[in-house]
Image (spheres, rainbow, N blue to C red):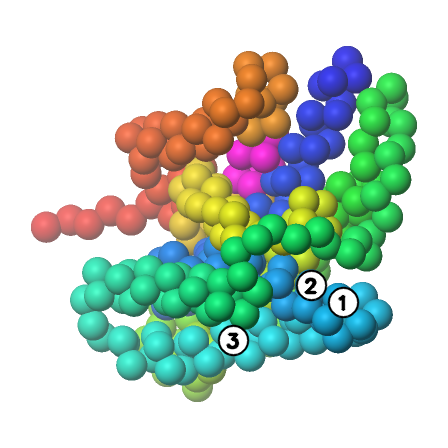
Amino acid sequence: MELFIQLTLTGLTSGAILALAALGFVLIYKSSDVINFAQGEFLLIGAYVIFAMLTQAGLHWTFGLVLTIAVAVGLGVMVERLVLRPMIGEPIISVIMVTIGLSSLLKAIVSTIWGNTPQAFPPFIPSEPVNILGATVGQDRLWALVIAAVLLGGFNLFFRRSREGIAMRAVADDQQAALSMGISVKRIFAWAWSIAAATAAIGGALVANIVGVGPELSHFGLRVFPVVILGGLDSIPGAIVGGLIIGLLEQYTGGYLGQGLNQVLPFVVLIVILMFRPYGLFGQEIIERV
């Protein structure tokens, strides 16, 4: 029972962080139909920027986190303006290849600045273990779960109640209709990329606080693909549910069947979902009649 509780709490934490990264992925796809293969590198940059703020600049973690989010927002806007906006109207495969190239470029920039050696992260969240129903879990994981849940709830309210959030939903549903209503589609694209970069950076900070910083953090972004395929490429609730499901499956598989299989299982789920429900659990099914 203790093992089950520990695996469940750990899985929920991983799933919540995956959901944060997947949220940005879904936002970009919903608003611009672009599949962003550089989402993992946004997470990597967020982890290294807050690492630099805390260790090299010596800032308090609150200022470091705020500046990290600001850097991520700036990066997202810059990528949208300089890289993706000129690609509007180009074949989708060209846009996908651009995001793959962007992924390699961002990883190379991180490697040039900070090197490839994993480094210990100065924790800004307490990591002392706590006992919950006989299971021992680090406080950092519990805090990460709470922070991710609050952020996901806040973003959900933003999309449902705020003017910008409603505009983003309108653009996602029909760009031409949104334009006719006076909504700036280009501005919404910038919003989508900035929020995607910010959520990935926050996720990177939470992951770095738990496991440290290193180039392998970008692989965390690969785990986003099973999440968004499971939940649905165009579904924000699906990103949250998919993240929690994949996080729990990884931990249960690793805990009960052995390490190694937990890295493979998400991609097995991805293949199964693509075979039997390609639009995901919550994705919008599009039927084209000829």
Describe residue 152's horizontal placement relative to residue 176 as left or right.
Answer: right
Rendered view: 72 above or below 44: below
Counting from the top left corner in percent of width and height, residue 67 is at 70, 75
Q: Residue at x 29, y 49 (%)?
A: 286
For numbered disc 2, what is the local secondary structure? Answer: helix
For numbered disc 1, what is the local secondary structure? Answer: helix
Q: Earlier in the sequence, mark 1 or mark 3?
A: 1
Residues at marks 2 and 1, CA–CA distance in whole angstroms = 5 Å
Q: Amino acid at mark 3?
A: Leu
Counting from the top left corner in percent of width and height, residue 246 is at 54, 34
Front one among 180 and 17: 17
Q: Magenta span: helix, strand or loop, mainly?
A: helix
Residue named by callout 2:
51
Q: Residue at x 61, y 27 (%)?
A: 251
Describe residue 117's horizontal placement relative to residue 290 as left or right.
Answer: right
Describe residue 22's horizontal placement relative to residue 212 as left or right.
Answer: left
Residues at marks 1 and 3, CA–CA distance in whole angstroms = 20 Å
Q: Is residue 33 visible?
A: no
Q: Quadrant of the N terminus?
A: top right
Rendered view: 30 above or below 261: below
Q: Residue at x 64, y 76 (%)?
A: 70
- Numbered mark located on residue 54 in the image: 1
